[in-house]
Amino acid sequence: MHHDDLADTVPPPAPPRLALGPLLYHWPRQQVRRFYAAMEVLPLDVVYLGETVCSRRQELRLNDWLAIAQRLKGAGKQVVLSTQVLIASTDEATALHRIVENGEFLVEAGDMGAVHLLAGRMPFVAGMHLNLYNPAALAWMAGLGATRWVMPLELPAAALAALQAARPPGLQTEVFAYGRMPLAYSAQCLTARHRNLSKDDCRFSCLQHPDGMTLRTREREGLLVLNGLQMQSARVFNLVGEIDALRALGVDVLRLSPQAEHMEEIVRLFDAVRRHAMAPAEALRQTLPWMPDLPCNGYWHGQPGRDQRGAAARSS
Amino acid sequence: MPATLSAAMPCAPDAAPAPVPALAAPRCPELVCLAGSLPALRAAVDHGADSVYLGLRHATHARNVAGLHFDDAAIATGIRYAHDRGVHVFVALDTYPQASHPQPWRQAVDQAVGMGADAILLADPGLMQYAARTHPQLRLHLSAQGSGTHADAINLYRQQFGITRAVLPRALSLEQVRQVIERTPVEIEVFGFGSLCVMVEGRCVVPSYATGGSPPMHGVCPPAQALRWQQTPRGWGARLNGVLTDRLAGGGSAGDPALCQGRFAVGDESGCCAIEQPKCLNTLSLLPQLMRAGVRAITIEGLQRSPAYVAEVTRVWREALDHCAAQPQTDVPRAGWMRRLEQAAAGQRHPLGACHRPGT
């Protein structure tokens, strides 16, 4: 598929905006600051900030995140504060209230508790783990005040088409388009458990794994990644080759999930494709060396998530 | 801190939902048993369940396993059998309707109501809205698949749809269960006994990553048809849609085919159960604390178990609940109950789930 195929579409869908998803890993604070300083100059339109995985991770406090948010805002980015996906304790609920009441930045609701606090009070982004799988659920969420929703990972293009056809007016659609996929959340810390440590005495084991710990089958295939309370895919979901289809479906925002190395190259390749400065297939080929594992796009095609359809199955 | 929470987020609904009929107040937590078949339902009813959950035979239930659940005739028979004996029947419809054809889920709601279900268990807010509007007198329960892990989340479903009960995900500790109950008027149900998954319900699509089918969308974990055992020169290998999840070199016992219970390698190690070992949750020893916390119902999960298992586990929990209700200060469970549960569960371990934190 080449961009010329869409040249006679009237009116041409606007190019999707690029968003940097929240940092899912636990990095030392200096690394986090360096990372976001580098992001300021990249062609990103939206940046999601905050700790969404584990409340024990305290390298940055809310005020530190807000300071980064101000810098990014000054650089012209729309900043969104993301809330934790699994909230179980009253301390975590209190932290959630503080984020909701930040008074300045848009909030991405990581769970239905956040939705409750935001509903009817201010516009918000409905996060990807809210399980909005059908038009009725989407309409309900828009009615509560969501101005953007993030599609669940599992949904294929065909389901997105049905949802877009019934999309409430004024609701933007965001799709997770690049990164290791957050597949599950656990009551236990998966990283600490691997060191025979409990969640409450984890010794911040995840700090040592800037892209998570890869779990391999006995045939050495990278299968899953342990990231604190979160389980990720080992393979990297990569829709850079599908940007034309995403645009044709009226997707407003593409989410790129941070990785420890070469994020800049990834952002620039997505940007080149959305500006029609590079063919999608070529961009896919060029992303491969910058990825921590093999690509996959199965969910988008209604197949098992780890599958890769089309070109670019890299030999490892 | 609690004052801040309650001030910011009143529990009372903004728009009062239609009143729904209350079930008879239990003298102690309601004993709720999941029944995967008509014989299992009868076993639960006969041995002391206050309520039973059943699922329809299709993808509307989060555990859509071949050979399980109820066709129309069995539902009618099961509901009549339970109601004749004063036992409530809840119908579980806790998968997420598909984007392009949600109709089967709505029909299932209507069908459950038409057949006399006392409540339905849902996770999808769109379906909940449909049920609340179409059947305003129907009791709605929030499934654990809805991931209501704290009061703010549960109170949203109450405010919006008038739910009367929430089943808490197994991720919560006893203290966290207490905190939820203090902050919501919604009845709280917790899992008491049965298979334990380390992943939070409604937050896991690991099965579909490997196989294409998942609990939220298809009611499967994992889809049975995706599993193949193959003999290889290095022993029997279990493959889930081609992914090697386990290998038995000698006479070792196989893990569950679920991906999370496979054996994988992390770093330099190999062959460890890196995520979770097959386990059976058992909170019997916490029963007095759960009762003092105000838990309204306790679920026994034996969906893929025999009627004999359901009968024995139900009987033990009935005795234990009656005992604790009569003697609320008794903290130590009878050793005999634990032994019988262990025998019923065929030697699987009985951790306390997240109610117990390792090292604490």
Image: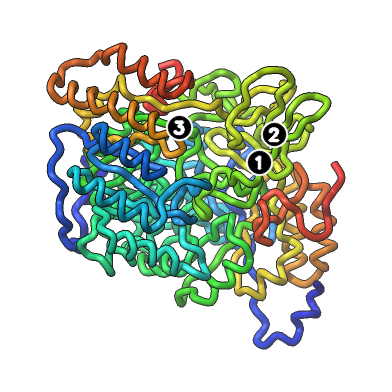
The 10 Å Cα crowd at callout 3, few under 14, some 14 to 19, many 20 or more, is many
Image-based side of A17 in relation to A238, left or right: left
Residue placed furthest toward the right: A315
For label 2, the residue is B238
Q: Is residue A102 visible?
A: no
For the residues beneath circles 1 and 2, the answer to whether they share a chain is: yes
Real-space Cα distance between discs 1 and 3?
19 Å
Have a look at marks 1 and 3 and say if they share a chain. yes
Which residue does the numbered mark 1 point to in the structure image? B227
Residue at screen point 26% across, 41% down: B188
Q: Is residue B252 above or below residue A274?
A: above
Q: Which one is earlier in the sequence, the residue at label 1 or at label 2?
A: 1
Q: Residues within 10 Å of mark 1 (few under 14, many from 20)?
A: some
- Amino acid of disc 3: Ser
Q: Tell me the quadrant of the picture where the C terminus of chain B can be found.
A: top left
Q: What is the C-alpha distance between the residues marked 1 and 2?
A: 7 Å
Comparing labels 1 and 3, the label whose residue is closer to the camera: 1
Q: Which residue is drawn at the image coordinates 63% and 52% (left, top)?
A: B212
Q: Which residue type carries mark 2?
A: Ala
Q: Earlier in the sequence, mark 1 or mark 3?
A: 3
Check residue B195 in the rendering and tell me which mark sits there, or answer none: 3
**Secondary element type, mark 2:** strand
Who's the residue at 64% across and 76% down the image? A14
Residue A102, percent from left and from top: 39, 51
Q: CA distance from mark 2 to mark 3?
A: 21 Å
**Residue A316 vertical placement versus A285 (above, below):** above
The answer to whether residue B255 is above or below residue B66 is above
Tag 1–tag 2 contact (CB < 8 Å): yes
Residue A236: x, y in percent?
71, 48
Report helix, strand or loop for mark 3.
strand
